[in-house]
Amino acid sequence: MTPRLRSAGAVLFSALVLSVSFSSAAVASDSVSTDIDRFLSETYPATEPGAAVIVVQDGKTLLRKGYGMANLELDVPIAPESVFEVGSVTKQFTATAILMLQERGRLSVQDDITKYLTDFPTQGKKVTIENLLTHTSGIPSYTGMKEWAPTMREDLPLEKLIAFFKGKPFDFEPGTKWDYDNSGYVLLGAIVEKVSGKSYERFVEDEIFKPLGMTHSSYGSWSDIVPHRAAGYDREDNHFVNTAYISMTQPYAAGALLSTVDDLALWDKAMSAGTLVKAASLERMFTPYTLPSGASTRYGYGWTLHELAGKKVIEHGGDINGFSCDVLRIPEAKILVVVLTNNPEAAMRPDGVTHRIASTLLGVPDLERKIRLSEKALDEYAGVYRTGDTTRNVSRDGGKLFIQRAGGTKREIQATGPDTFTYAMAYITVHFSRDAQGKISGMLFESYHGLAEPEIARTSEPLPAEKQEAKVDTALYDSYLGTYELVPGFELAITRDGEHLFGQATGQPKNELFPESPTKFFLKVVDAQIEFQKGDGGAVTSLVLHQGGQDTVGKRVR
């Protein structure tokens, strides 16, 4: 799902997308394909989890190849036939299912959702199916809720999944704002079931996969035998670990599907040909929703919409435990690029990879061609930026510029043009604005995922001082070792290795803790602090996690 399905757990402690035949040749012989192949080989090293990639232009497969490893334990390399979890790329299939039912006269996207979900409390507000499709319902996303994270391993019936957000206060009035919402697509899956009389899984299999010949696509299952299934991985310290388990009942219609690059190429052909739904439905699917303010959300029905080199891009990514992907279509240029990876923490995000490849095919400069700025020039952008409750610090370290959201990870941005930067790993552009005197006054984020945030104004506040490590008696570390329960089922394990203390949350990498006092520690990979607390007897009985403006108490359980 996008944002990453596992992000709810990450908020506590994280360093923290017909028949046709394909040529058996891995890569076309022309120089463009050779350049793309070289780039992909560098991005996904042969000995690490990697990616399956397909690149199609004008109906010709320019590249179809696997890079890196599908299974590190069994030493199995990735092949084009490898099956990956595709996370939020599921949403475009869910949206198509809704439009298929609309064309059959079974529903209208303008219907109030309570026509089909009669017991869902909309609190006096009108929420339409279109609001769910376009992430404009105001219903809070369950993957952002602290109480959801500990349940990821549980097999949940649909009604219990909906119960996570059912009755919760709306984030905003329906139709007035855009906010990426996995809950909305769960409700869309429930509507598909109610109207069709089939389970969501059965509908997608019978009505989409089978008619299109997508024989290697399915609803995710850990009990089913899935030939050529790639294993999902995360990076811990400097090595890879198996990703945290998640029951596939939980991503559901928002992110539970599996697929291959070949099947997604079949899907692209069906979209281009209007095989499943009519041209009018496709046009609406690929038209961004417009807010009452006149602002475009740059999101249609299950697809994000933007431009590259003046050409319309139709795209969506997907993230779920151990996997990440991106599907990028440029109909005018007849380009399709699909990247499916089991290495979500690779040097470049899949959307960065697809955009670089598409830029190469279009013959335009891509966002990886950076501009080198002096330290003095970079200092112009440094400062504290704030809008509402959101604060971001922009700082320079040597010849590099970084952005860190309060409670988040410090990430490098690189200059690509006048007052324009991109994140090193992803296709997210940061535009800095200037006032009448030419001084930097704010910044605006632009992402293919949808509506950019409102401009974040620069404040006059000084940047907070970098935390400094204090010298403490490391013998104290032994008294902190143990497991602390932050919420039921979500724990933080404190361990040591020699003179170093570490914390590791359930399903997440291990991160070093640095002392700022004998009882207080901070992380460098993410804006978070931990404070150990003693009970009446003098023994450590709990800790407090300070992150993102919240204080979470964890009782020592082991």
Image (cartoon, helix red, strand yellow):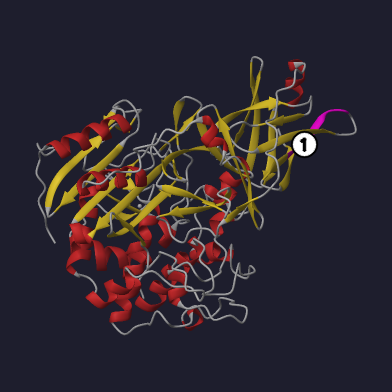
- Residue 358, compared with residue 68, is above or below; it is below
Q: Main secondary structure of the magenta part?
A: strand
Give the amino acid type for the residue marked by disc 1 in the picture.
Ser
Residue 45: percent from left, percent from top: 31, 28
* Range shown magenta: 538-544
Q: 10 Å neighbourhood of mark 1: few (<14), some, or many (≥20)?
A: many
Q: Residue furthest front?
A: 437
Quarter of the image for the C terminus: give it.
top right
**Left or right: 278, with 393 as reference point:** left
Which residue: 25% across, 65% down? 208
Residue 151 lies, in percent from the top left, at 56, 51
293 sits to left or right of 102: right
Question: Can residue 508 be spotted in the picture?
Answer: no
Residue 435: quarter of image: bottom right
The residue where tag 1 is placed is 542
Quarter occupied by residue 475 = top right
**Residue 347 vertical position relative to residue 340 in the rendered view, above or below:** above
The residue positioned 32% from the left and 77% from the top of the image is 101
Percent position of residue 425, x then y: 42, 39
| Above or below 220: residue 521 | above
Establish if 141 lies above or below 406: below
Evaluate whether residue 163 shows in this view: yes
Frontmost residue, 506 versus 270:
270
How far across and how far down the image is residue 229, in percent? Answer: 30, 42
